[in-house]
Amino acid sequence: MIKNDIFLPDEMEKDREKLEKTLKKIIFIETERMNDVKGLPVTSSKFGGNPYFPKNMEYPKNENGIPLSMLAQINFSDIFNQEDIRSEIERDLELKYLPRKGILSFFIDYYDDVLGSDFGKNTKKTGYRVIYFPELENDNNLINDFKFLEQRTDNFYPVVDGEYRLNFKILDQMVTMESYEWEKIIGKEPYDYLEELGEDVEDKVYEEYSEAYAGGHQIGGYPFFTQWDPRAAYENLDKYNFLLFQLDSDFDNKKNIMWGDAGVGNFFINIEDLKKKDFSNVLYTWDCS
């Protein structure tokens, strides 16, 4: 991803001033697959693996009583303990409202063929959970036996296969063409915008711009979709105006993270709820090509 070069295809230079006004800081997430011998500590920021979870809390389950699987967890200390990242976040108009400590965990239903989502309608609440642990318990108070998560069947559809260590950095991002904000800012749907550039270049321009600014794992900024932004398609979903977490398909260098057919998953929250550290009302959606 070319994000920090503030790159634009030549054909889009005419709109540089307008597009540069959309620039946002994002927390970009890089992954490193761990071997299968020794897992990461349960307090680590990670994709997959065993979750941090206190014994005195009820573990999240689907409507049939089957435990949900941990998709990812973010330990905010791993982010804010890095001085260069912390200073960037504290100056940002949106990222500054993220918690400074604690763990935010994302659970979804791997036993459901649609992975616990209703694709943006936000009426199905049992297929996923987002849980925030503001204060971390000591090891004696944590679940340390996760055999109850190993009862897999042919109906088990894991998005994250394996366990991945996370590294964080700050990047710049312009509005993605897939985000519902594109049309508000540019005044045209992406298809119309690209078509006006010329049939001979529209595919090239889209690919170059998307390569620079769309896709990947991130917190904040503009989402990527392989289909469309559900916040524009369904009523009252535009209130979910902050990208809390995006997990993209990732299968380079022996990685195995996959949403259906090379799709992407997104979690959104209203910025006012983020300010209150209230993660009880989060929009979860994923799609694939």
Image (tube, rainbow, N blue to C red):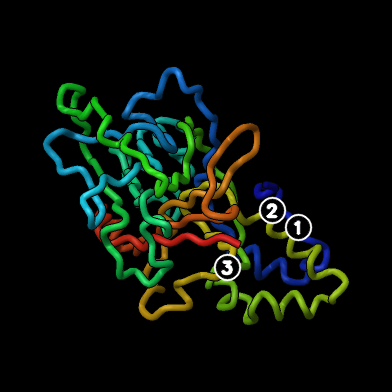
Report crowding for label 1: few under 14, some 14 to 19, many 20 or more residues within 10 A (C-alpha).
some
Task: Specify the farthest residue to the right.
Answer: 200
Left or right: 137 in relation to 9: left
Packing grade of label 2 (10 A; few <14, some 14-19, many >=20) is: many
Q: Which of marks 1 and 3 is nearer the N terminus?
A: 1
Mark 2 and mark 1 in contact? Answer it, CB < 8 Å.
Answer: yes
What amino acid does circle 1 point to? Glu
Asked if residue 184 lies left or right of residue 240, the reply is right
Q: What residue type is labelled 3?
A: Gln
Q: Distance between the residues labelled 2 and 1?
A: 6 Å
Residue under the point 38% across and 61% down: 117
- Label 3: state its secondary structure: loop
Residue 74, can we see it?
A: yes
Dots 3, 2 in contact, CB < 8 A: no
Q: Residues within 10 Å of mark 3 (few under 14, many from 20)?
A: few
Give the residue at x 37% y 43%: 153
Q: Which dot, 1 or 3, sits closer to the camera?
A: 3
The mark lying in front, picked from 3 and 2, is 3
Structural distance between the alpha carbons of marks 1 and 3: 18 Å
Residue 227 marker: 3
**Left or right for 265, reference 271:** right
Residue drawn at x 64%, y 63% as measured from the top left: 20
Residue at the extreme left = 56
In the image, 198 versus 81, the foreground residue is 198
Image coords of residue 174 (percent x, y): 61, 60
Q: Mark 2 points at which residue?
A: 212
Q: Residue at x 40, y 23 (%)?
A: 39
Label 3 – label 2 distance at C-alpha: 19 Å
Please indicate, yes or no, whether residue 101 appears anywhere in the rendered image: no
In the displayed structure, 155 sits above or below 230; it is: above
- What residue is shown with label 1? 208
